[in-house]
Image (cartoon, grey):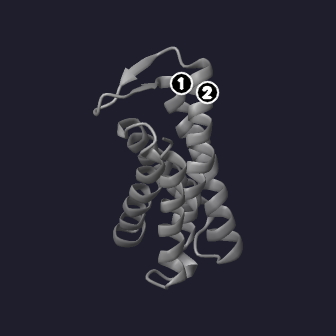
Amino acid sequence: HIYGPFYYAISITVLVSIYTFQIIPVENFYVSAACLTIMYLGDGMAATIGVRWGKHKYKTVIGGQKSVEGSVAMFLFGFLGALIGLWFFGILNYGKIDLLEAFTLAFLSSLIATFIEAVSPSGFDNLSVPLLTALVMNIIHFQIGI
C-alpha cells in the first residue's frame, strides 16, 4: 500500500480549503504555498538524492532510516521551493511581503520542514511536512511577526 500520495492529496486539500473557505484570508496563501512547494521540490529531491547518493544514514525517532544527503537536499530544494511560492504569491500577486521577508520565511520554513521530515515515518511525511510547517509558519509569521 502506498499511502504517501494519498496523504499528499489530503495535505493539499486541507491547505487550499483553508483559503478557499476564507478561514484565513486568501491573500495570506503565500505561507501555505511555500509549505506545499517545499513538499513538491524538497521532499521529491530528498528521496531521489537520498536513495542515489545517501551514504550517511541516521535513524529517525520512530525507527525509520534517512540519509544526511537526503536531508540536506530537503533543506536546499525546500528553500528554493519556498522562495518560489513566496515570490509568486507573497510578492508578485499580492505584494504582502518584500524580498527580505521572503528569504527569511523561506529559510525558516525549509529548516522547520527538514526537521519535521527527518522525524516523520516514511510516507507519513507527505501529510506532516506541509501541514505542520504551515501551522508553525502561520504562528511565526502572523503571531510573532517574523
Residue 103 vertical placement versus 1 (above, below): below
Q: Which mark is residue 36?
A: none
Q: Quadrant of residue 84?
A: bottom right
- Report x, y in % for residue 1: 48, 41
Q: Amino acid at mark 2?
A: Ile
Residue position for label 1: 69
Q: CA distance from mark 2 to mark 1?
A: 7 Å
Mark found first going from the N terminus, 2 or 1: 2
Q: State which mark lies toward you, 2 or 1.
A: 2
Few, some or many residues within 10 Å of mark 1 (<14, 14–19, 20+):
many
Left or right: residue 112 versus residue 28 is left
Identity of the residue drawn at 47% across and 24% down: 68
Identity of the residue drawn at 55% across and 80% down: 26
- The residue lying toward the viewer, choosing from 139 and 127, is 127
Residue position for label 2: 49
Residue 62 vertical placement versus 52 (above, below): below
Residue 104 visible, this angle: no
Tell me the element at label 2. Answer: helix
Tell me the element at label 1. Answer: helix
Q: Amino acid at mark 1?
A: Glu
Quadrant the C terminus occupies:
bottom left
- Report x, y in % for residue 40: 61, 49
Residue 131 visible, this angle: yes
- Report x, y in % for residue 141: 42, 66
Whether the residues at callouts 2 and 1 have beta carbons within 8 Å, the answer is yes
- The residue lying toward the viewer, choosing from 64 and 57, is 64
Left or right: residue 10 versus residue 62 is right
Identity of the residue drawn at 47% across and 76% down: 18
Identity of the residue drawn at 28% across and 32% down: 61
Q: Residue furthest top?
A: 55
- Report x, y in % for residue 121: 37, 38
